[in-house]
Image (cartoon, rainbow, N blue to C red):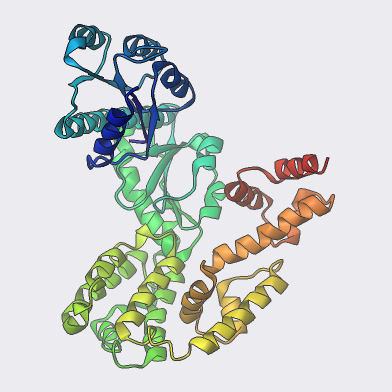
Amino acid sequence: MRKILIAEDEKLIRAGIRTMISRSGVKIEEILETNNGEDAWKILQNEKVDAVFTDIRMPKMDGIELVRKIHEMEKPPFVVAISGYDDFEYAVEMLRNGVLEYLLKPVEREKITDVLKLIESKVSAVEKKKERDAYTSVIDKGSYRVIMFYPGAPVIDLQEDFKAAKLPDAPDGDLYVVNSEDFSADDWAELGGVGISAEHENEEELSRAYQEVRGARLTAFCTGGVVCFEDLDRFKEYPDEELLTEAARTRRIQLIGTGKQKELLNQWDNLFDAAAKGLISAEDFKNEINLSLRTIPRIYKSLFEERGLDERILKLEEPLLCPDMDSYREHFMRFLLRLNGIWEKQDDAEPAKKKIALAIDYIKDNYPKDLNMAVVSNYISMNYTLFSIAFKQHTGTNFVNYLKNVRLKEAKALLVETDEKIIDIARAVGYENYKHFLKLFRMEYGVSPTEYRKNMQKEEF
């Protein structure tokens, strides 16, 4: 649940109810409080509240009047009435007016927990109905596609722009359904690693669409960009399946713990690079990773006595929970290096720090160009994987976000200090795709470049 409102004029009772709600075990984002019905009604007019716990006897507006007003709302919250024995007749009237539950003072902790669980189930049911109504309304318009992103991908503005609706209960990513007429693969490219199903006609085909989009998402995860189900045929020839042999797998795994850091990283990098280039299938890559993750604890059982390694293995077993191959590779290599016992020693920490400083200078001097992590790591003569890990350790963010922040910061300065067209500013900071620049800017700052420029001009007067 997002928000609960407590309306109770007695401070100690109000504090007690708040404490019991906080300790109930039911997840609640925010608890609001007030000591009278009038203020409670004002809060409800300005805040989206899931449930109200209200006393009957309160100053300015009593609980009965508050409940009557609540039930005039278009989308009323659930209401729990709280009172003493003397108010029983009033409580009965409140129950007739749609109050979900009636609690007697002194309120028992178990009662609070039970009613919160009841409300949570009802709120969940309402949310699921909203989700279903949203995606069925898209499907009912005609043919549709299903799009799959990594979990938590920032697609709110895209949802508004392209009339996409989220599908519930996806275990390995965020699923959205979009009407075919509103669909363009380029519109989703900035999120990276996006899978898209073929076109479908009715709700009965959602299961098939899910299987398609999952395969497309896995391939997009490995190769980057956007992959539509119809395009999977171009990934069917895999010339480097030697990497999937038992001998190759044994070689990669047996290097752990030998102290041969460079060879260890190179062997595993070969597997990741082959998947990224389409030289092995995305499904084979995932199966190979999972097989390796099941084998490593058996071979290096003593190393797994260190607390936390088993949990790390579990997190690595589902690559699709990461945005893309680069981010997953970073997590995987960190795990290998920790297991290898080399990275934590950091014998070369100082040279790495100097190289990252050199990389940062290079980025700041060359951000308008077509930069990527391979270009910069080659410039400073550092292994790609080690560069990724070291860069995040020294800057606090990954390479992609750092470059984006440098570019957008410069774009803000140009918007304020010059009269250049926004499309020219986008190119000046390294974005040839104007639409992509607009999306990134809005996602980062909450306003368009045009709105930002206008707002900053207003502040000058």
Q: Is residue 370 left or right of residue 42?
A: right
Q: Is 306 situated above or below 74? A: below
The quarter in which the C terminus is drawn is: top right
User: Which residue appears at 14% of the width and 34% of the height?
Assistant: 110
Q: Is residue 278 left or right of residue 351?
A: left
Q: Is 400 situated above or below 296? A: above
Q: Which quadrant holds residue 51?
A: top left
Residue 426 visible in rendering: no
Q: Is 251 situated above or below 33? A: below
| Coordinates of residue 234 in the picture (x, y in percent) | 45, 62
Q: Nearer the viewer, residue 187 or 128?
A: 128
User: Which residue appears at 79% of the width and 51% of the height?
Assistant: 416
The quarter in which the N terminus is drawn is: top left
| Coordinates of residue 151 in the picture (x, y in percent) | 39, 52
Q: Is 361 situated above or below 160? A: below
Q: Is residue 306 left or right of residue 5?
A: left
Q: How many marks?
A: 0
| Coordinates of residue 429 in the picture (x, y in percent) | 72, 61
Q: Nearer the viewer, residue 423 or 304?
A: 304
Residue 291 visible in rendering: yes
User: Which residue appears at 42% of the width and 90% of the height?
Assistant: 262
| Coordinates of residue 277 in the picture (x, y in percent) | 46, 71
